[in-house]
Image: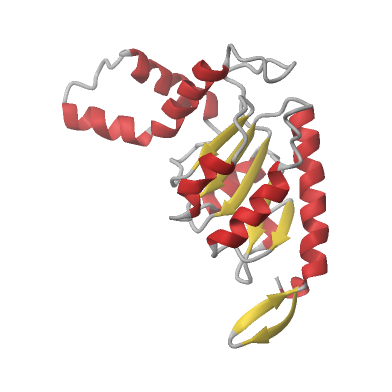
Amino acid sequence: MKAFIIGCRHKRYIFDLQQTFYHLKVASSVLKKAFREGERILIYSDHEIFGELLPWVCPKHPSLYILNQPPVGGFLTNWQSLYKYAWHLEEGDRKGLRKKSQLQRHLKRFQPFIDFRKQDLLLQNEDTSSQKLSPWKSPGLLLIFHGQKAQPLMEEARRLRMPTIALLNSDGDPSLVTYPIPANNQHPKALLLIAQILFSAFHLED
């Protein structure tokens, strides 16, 4: 991240804001293009505070999925299988899960996909877009706001050649990201400001 840093004050690195604004503009264009082309977008943050705020600041749309807990292995590479299995759990097809404790572990592990399923059911009848997305469709873009445990997710995205946008602090690795945004991803206020800028690219009212 040295290329994005212009100095250090009180043991804190200072980012070049011109580069931050430039990369924000690029990321906004990428998000807008993916949205208009009907791509499903996975938005991830494991920040304790911002992760809880994210569902409130993110636009409600069938193409946008929010993940605010560390993902299970194969979250992206086995997306369709995990989604379908979570759907069977939600529908009551729990064969082989006889013990309640075992069932609860499975439900917790697949909770994100159960939430995605509920979101699809809730929004499938709303005319929010001219494009209808298949419920089994895998994400075509990954957006990471804060991800201390996101490296496996980024590596899966890279294996799938899935574009990735990520906010990176001074200790981040831009080689893992297609579109890095140099910024403070530790403070909730900074994350909220950047989220508002990025989400404005969707123009859901159009």
Q: Is residue 158 above or below residue 140?
A: below
- The residue located at (48%, 22%) in the rendering is 117
Where does the image place residue 113, in percent across and percent down from the top left? 45, 29
Q: How is the image coloured?
A: secondary structure
Q: Place residue 114 in its image quadrant.
A: top left
Q: Is residue 148 above or below residue 127?
A: below
Q: Residue furthest bottom?
A: 10
Q: Is residue 114 above or below residue 144?
A: above
Quarter of the picture containing the C terminus is top right
Quarter of the picture containing the N terminus is bottom right
Q: Residue furthest front?
A: 205
- Left or right: residue 87 compared with residue 159: left
- The residue located at (81%, 66%) in the rendering is 19
Where does the image place residue 28, in percent across and percent down from the top left? 77, 46
Task: Please state which of residues 106 and 53 is positioned toward the viewer in this rendering.
Answer: 53
Q: How many discs mark residues in the rendered view?
A: 0
Q: Is residue 98 above or below residue 146?
A: above
Where does the image place residue 154, in percent across and percent down from the top left? 60, 48
- The residue located at (49%, 27%) in the rendering is 116
Task: Please state which of residues 155 and 12 is positioned toward the viewer in this rendering.
Answer: 12
Where does the image place residue 70, in percent across and percent down from the top left? 44, 47
